[in-house]
């Protein structure tokens, strides 16, 4: 599902953020990515999401070499990938419904289908009753659930979560992790970047460790 071969990434010439990264995440896996601040976790996710390009080496998403994609075909690849961030990145002045609906509307999804799928996905994260509220009126855990709903409404093959519980208390953290595991159980490949050792130790999924830009399995 996600493969990297000898991937190097530098933002500034001469400073490698990632060095000779090799990894393979299979379809349906749940994998943690960990490492101290600055180790390169977000950078690795950005390469998978095609928001950054590798300086050298190969990044394959569903067997496709992303370096060979034309800029017009990148949006098609991105449809296979949902992304969740630490700070939710919701649109404050749009309702919960609209925040999720937007992800379908940009694809030209018919109105009736948008209505149905948005309400279905909000139900799956337990927030159907809050669809008319605005993000600032929700708790952090609720906002993250909306962000997750937005990331999966399009039924992506891959879900990338970058410190999804970084702003949440321990109870909310557990709730969000359960939700990510539910999503994984329905067949989505899930990759979660976190530096929270307690989460990793509790759940015991395969963990990729980044240390000074190198991966340790
Ligand atoms: N756009 C950029 N331009 C220059 N350097 C960058 C850029 N983005 C990241 N870096 C550098 O790359 C290194 C890795 O950053 P990255 O954000 O991938 O780490 P991280 O593991 O996600 O850290 P954190 O746990 O703090 O989120 C850091 O040294 C950072 O300063
Ligand atoms: Mg990061």
Image (cartoon, rainbow, N blue to C red):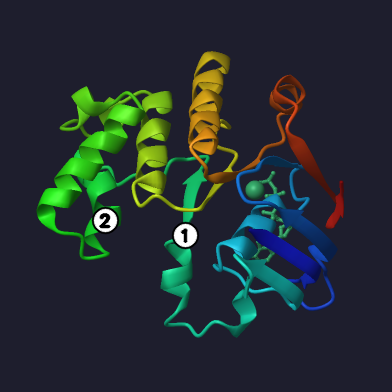
Question: Most extreme residue toward the left, as rendered?
Answer: 112
Q: Is residue 25 above or below residue 67?
A: above
Which residue is found at the position 69% from the left and 58% from the top? 44
- Ligand 1 positioned in quadrant: bottom right
Q: Which one is earlier in the sequence, the residue at label 2 or at label 1?
A: 1
Q: Which residue is mark 2?
A: 104
**Residue 17's x, y, as percent?**
79, 63
**Residue 68's x, y, as percent?**
60, 84
Q: Is residue 30 above or below residue 182?
A: below
Q: Is residue 95 above or below residue 158?
A: above
**Residue 213's x, y, as percent?**
83, 57
Residue 80, disc = 1
Which residue is found at the position 26% from the left and 56% from the top? 104
Quarter of the rendering occupied by the N terminus: bottom right
Find numbered disc 1 in the image and state the secondary structure of the residue it sits on: loop
Query: Is 14 on the left-hand or right-hand side of 200?
Result: right
Assess disc 1: are there few (<14), some (14-19) or many (≥20) residues with their C-alpha within 10 Å of its C-alpha: some
**Residue 160's x, y, as percent?**
56, 48
- 48 and 206: which one is in front? 206
């Amino acid at each position: 599902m996600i493969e990297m071969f000898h991937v190097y990434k530098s933002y500034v010439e001469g400073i490698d953020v990632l060095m000779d990264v090799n990894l393979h995440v299979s379809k349906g896996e749940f994998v943690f990515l960990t490492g101290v601040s600055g180790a390169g976790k977000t950078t690795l996710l950005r390469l998978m999401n095609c928001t950054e390009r590798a300086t050298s080496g190969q990044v394959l998403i569903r067997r496709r070499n992303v370096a060979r994609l034309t800029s017009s075909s990148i949006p098609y690849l991105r449809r296979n990938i949902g992304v969740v961030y630490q700070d939710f990145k919701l649109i404050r002045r749009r309702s919960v419904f609209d925040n999720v609906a937007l992800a379908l509307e940009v694809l030209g999804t018919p109105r009736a289908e948008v209505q149905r799928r948005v309400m279905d996905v909000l139900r799956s994260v337990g927030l159907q009753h809050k669809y008319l509220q605005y993000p600032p009126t929700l708790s952090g855990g609720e906002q993250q659930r909306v962000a997750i709903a937005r990331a999966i409404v399009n039924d992506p093959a891959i879900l990338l979560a970058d410190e999804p519980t970084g702003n949440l208390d321990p109870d909310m953290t557990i709730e969000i992790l359960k939700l990510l595991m539910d999503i994984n159980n329905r067949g989505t490949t899930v990759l979660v970047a976190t530096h929270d050792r307690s989460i990793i130790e509790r759940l015991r999924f395969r963990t990729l460790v980044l240390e000074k830009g190198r991966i340790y399995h």
